Amino acid sequence: MKISRMLFFVALLSVLLLAACGDSGDGETIELRAATGLSSQHAWWDATMVPWMDRVEELTDGQVQFETFTGGELVDVPDEAEATLDGTIDVGLILPIYEPDQYPMAEVTMLPLAHSDTLIATRAWNRLLTESMELQDGESYSDMQFSEFKIFPTSTTQEYSISTTGHSFETVDDVEGTSLRTPSRIHELYSEKTGINSVTMPAVEMFDALSRGSFEGSYYSIADWSGYGFQDLFEYTLTGINFGHFNAFIGMSDDRFDELPENVQEAMEQAAEEVLIPGGEEWLDRAEEMIDYNEDEGGEFVEFDTLDQSVQDHFNEGIEETWLEYAELLEDQGLPGTDLIILWRDLIIEEGGDVPEALKDIE
C-alpha cells in the first residue's frame, strides 16, 4: 500500500510538472508591443511592419499577438531604438540615421550614387546588415553598430531626388546658392561641396516654409511626397541621379528575442525574409503614383543626363568628394570609414547599381 501511494504521488507530481511546463512553452500566448513614431500610412509601417506582424501571427497560429502604437502614441521618432532597448516596447521600427551620435555608420546608405533604385539598395542594405563581412577587429557592420539588437531588415526608401518649387539647373550658377532642406549629415556635406545652401528643418515644417518661399526645395524621396502634400508644391524634380536611400530595420533587443520560443524566433525570421522585397516594391508604386499626379498638375521631371555637361560634372564631383569626406569623418572617430564606403560601393555595384568612376578606384 505504501508503495502504491508513493507511485500515485510521483505520477501526480509528474502531471503537475508537465502542466507547468506547458504553460510557459510554445502554446502560451505571447503579447508583444510594437511601435513607431511614424504615421500608420507610412510605407515602412503599412507595407512592411504590418505584413510582418500579420505573417508572424499566422506562422505561429496566433501564439504571438501584437499591440501596436503609431504616430507618436507611445514613442516618438527617433526614440524607437531607446524604447526597444529599455523595454518600453518589445519591437520597434528603428530609424538609426536620425541618431548619428549613436549610430554614425548608419548614414552610409545616404551617400549619393550614379545609379540605384529601391530594390538595388534594399538588397545591398540587407546584405550589409546580415552578412558577416569583417570591417574592423573581426567585427561586422552590425556587430559594430547594432550589437544590442536582433535585426529584421526592411527595405530602404526610394532614392532621394532634388525637388524645387520651380528653380531649375541650367548652369552651374543655378546650382550654387540654391537653398535646399537637407535631411542628413551626408546631404549637408554634399551641399557644402556643391555650393548649395543647406537648410535644417523637420519634414513636417517644410510645406509652410516652402509655400512662403523661405527656401527653394529639398532632397526628398518622391514616393514619400503624399505624406506631407509636396506633390502639390514641387514643380521641378531632378531624376536620374541618386541622392541616397534612407534606411530602417525592425528591431528587438537581443535579450527579449532570446526569451522567445524557438518556433517564434523562426517565424519572425521567415516573415522578415518574405516581406523585404514586397516592402521595397511599395515605394516604387507610390513613386509612380506621385509622378503621374505631379505631371498632371504641371510638374516637370528632368533627367540628369539631359543637363549641360558642366552641370553634370559639378554634381558628380560633389558625389566623389562627399564619399571621401564621410569616410574621413568616421576615421576621425576611430571607425573604419574607408573600409565601410568600399564595402557599400561594392554591394551597390554587385546588386546592379553604380557609382561615379573615380570612386571605383578607391582601395
Image (cartoon, helix red, strand yellow):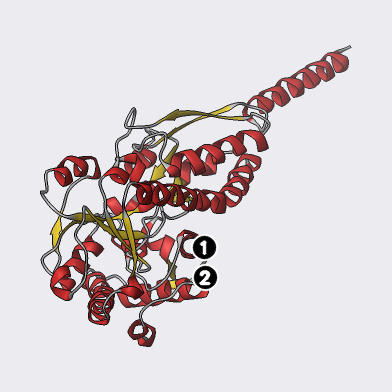
Camera-nearest residue between 21 and 36: 36
Which image quarter holds the C terminus?
A: bottom left
Q: Give how far across and how far down residue 159 sits, in percent.
A: 38, 60
What amino acid type is highlighted by mark number 2? Glu
The answer to whether residue 191 is above or below residue 254 is: below
* Secondary structure of the residue carrying numbered label 1: helix
Q: Which of 318 and 291 is in front in this view?
A: 291
Q: Is residue 198 left or right of residue 157?
A: left
Q: Earlier in the sequence, mark 1 or mark 2?
A: 1
> How far apart are labels 1 and 2 at the CA level?
7 Å
Compared with residue 121, is residue 94 higher up or lower down, i.e. above or below? above
Mark 1 residue type: Arg
Residue for badge 2: 351
The disc placed on residue 123 is 1
Residue at image location 52% in from the left, 65% down from the top: 131
144 or 54: nearer the viewer:
54
Left or right: residue 331 compared with residue 68: left
Judge from the rendering whether residue 204 lies leftward or rightward of residue 6; answer left or right.
left
